[in-house]
Image (cartoon, grey):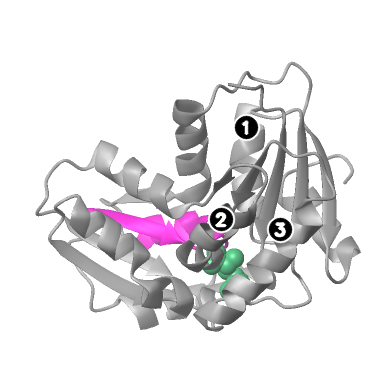
Amino acid sequence: MTDMTKAGVFDSGVGGLSVVKSLLQDNLFEEIIYYGDTARVPYGPKDKNTIIRYALEALEFFKNFDIDILIIACNSVSAYAIKELREVAPFPVVGVIEPGVIALANNIKDKNANILITGTKATVKSEKYKNLLQARGYKNITQKATPLFVPLVEEKIYSGQIIDAAMNHYFSEINSIDALIMGCTHFPLLEKEYKKMFPNTMLIHSGNAIVEYLKYNYDLKKSKNKTDIKFYATENPSHLKEVAKEWLELPSA
Ligand code: DGL
């Protein structure tokens, strides 16, 4: 197996930085090329064919870099376009959905556990998480699209009255959840609020799940140096860099 030192990370916008944060914590790569399709975010309300087309366009961008692996941080793209990307990509492509399901299965052994999947409309509509969980024998699965969380996080609103109202709007009738998948790049930024709403629930975070998946499936050596990240966006890259500085606590981006 060849050494993997350089990763591409793709997201519909800035949200994939939550996945980058997990990659940085483990220092898995020497270099990361982050590309956000900020001109066309959000992908969540878009249909399958559009998401596949955008993902294939992003792949062309990554071909300009000598990356060893492409990580699809976006759940909506992971839900619809992994097969299409793999068919034409000259490097391995991994999405976040399978790792999320594996993380859940590693922690929740009871097949009667109550599982809640939260995500964008596209991710929920794809039923990708649901199908993979059912294939592993899980029986009690509820899905809930929670698209309002995306613009709130984009507005850097992570707590307070509006988040409380949105949480109540989506979840007031949902009880006794054993495991909850935060199936969208933006949702880990609301982890504290999810915990408040579901205090005894195991939360699955795409970033942490993909780190475990990569470590298990690929021969990755921890980088000795701090990971070097380069940021690219289809629109307003300075906004992406500002958010990166804040979310990733970078001295400069
Ligand atoms: N990155 C998207 C996802 O994880 C969320 C934002 C969007 O709707 O594009 O599904």
User: Residue 46's spot in the image, x, y percent?
Assistant: 56, 83
Which residue sits at x=73%, y=67%?
A: 57
Distance of mark 3 from mark 1, alpha carbons? 26 Å
Please say if 11 is above or below 253: below
Q: Earlier in the sequence, mark 3 or mark 1?
A: 1
Q: Which residue is mark 3?
A: 59
Q: Is residue 7 left or right of residue 144?
A: right
Residue at x 60% of width, y 80% of height: 50
Amino acid at pointer 3: Leu
Task: Identify the mark at residue 25; answer none if there is no mark.
Answer: 1
| Disc 2 within 8 angstroms of ligand 1 (CB) | no
Q: As shown in the figure, which amino acid type bears the numbered disc 1? A: Gln
Look at the numbered disc 1 and say if its residue's Cβ is closer than 8 Å to ligand 1. no
Question: Where in the image, quadrant-wise, is ligand 1 located?
Answer: bottom right
Disc 2 secondary structure class = helix
Which of the pair 48/178 is nearer the observer? 48
Disc 3 versus disc 1: nearer the observer:
3
Q: Nearer the viewer, mark 1 or mark 2?
A: 2
**CB contact under 8 Å: marks 2 and 3:** no
Q: Earlier in the sequence, mark 1 or mark 2?
A: 1
Number of the label disc, if any, that sits on residue 87: 2
Q: Check the image and report above or below for 3 versus 25.
A: above
Q: Amino acid at mark 2?
A: Glu
Q: Residues within 10 Å of mark 1 (few under 14, many from 20)?
A: few
The residue under the point 85% across, 72% down is 235
- Left or right, residue 189 beside residue 109: right
